[in-house]
Amino acid sequence: MGIDFDGGLTCTLGVSDLDRSIDWYEKMLGFTLLYRVDEIGWCEVATAVDNVAMGLSQVESVAVGGGVTPTFGTTDIEAAKADLDAKGVRQDGPIQDVPGMVRLLTFYDPDDNPLMLYQDMRDAAE
């Protein structure tokens, strides 16, 4: 029978300070707070992708590395990089190019959780 998915997706990240993280995701990426539950140190922010949210869970020790890296598509990775540069967002080097396939940019939130942007170059190669 399989799983009857509802079309939604929440990507969860551990953070050290919920207030700081909400502020960062709103100001740096334009996400909006959906709700927060202080009793359990949890909130969700809406992303620019339909039915995809980021769940932020306040934890005592943020485990970084190994795990899923949320990767968001953009139509103009150069402009996106310039925006992140202007906001002082730490990045892992320049845009990486896989010719005829994709361009990638890795950047980090205040807790060093990695996030990425991609620009699909498959149509541009045709």
Image: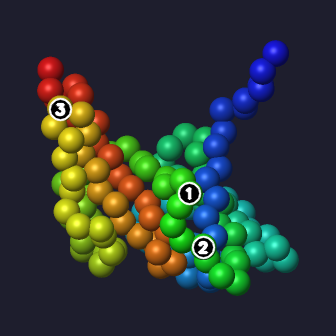
* Residue at x-position 55% and y-position 40%: 50
CB contact under 8 Å: marks 1 and 2:
yes
In the rendering, at what x and y percent does residue 16 appear?
A: 62, 82
Quarter holding the N terminus is top right
Q: CA distance from mark 1 to mark 2?
A: 10 Å
Q: Which residue is mark 3?
A: 100
Mark 3 neighbour density, 10 Å: few (under 14) some (14–19) many (20 or more): few
Direction from residue 37 to residue 9 in the image, left or right: left
Q: Position of residue 22 (x, y in %)?
A: 57, 73
Residue 12 location, x and y as percent?
64, 59
- Mark 2, residue position: 63
- Disc 1 crowd, CA 10 A, few/some/many (<14, 14-19, 20+): few
Contact between marks 3 and 2 (CB within 8 A): the answer is no
Question: What distance separates the C-alpha of mark 3 from that of mark 1?
Answer: 27 Å
Comes first in the chain, label 3 or label 1: 1
Sequence-wise first label, 3 or 2:
2
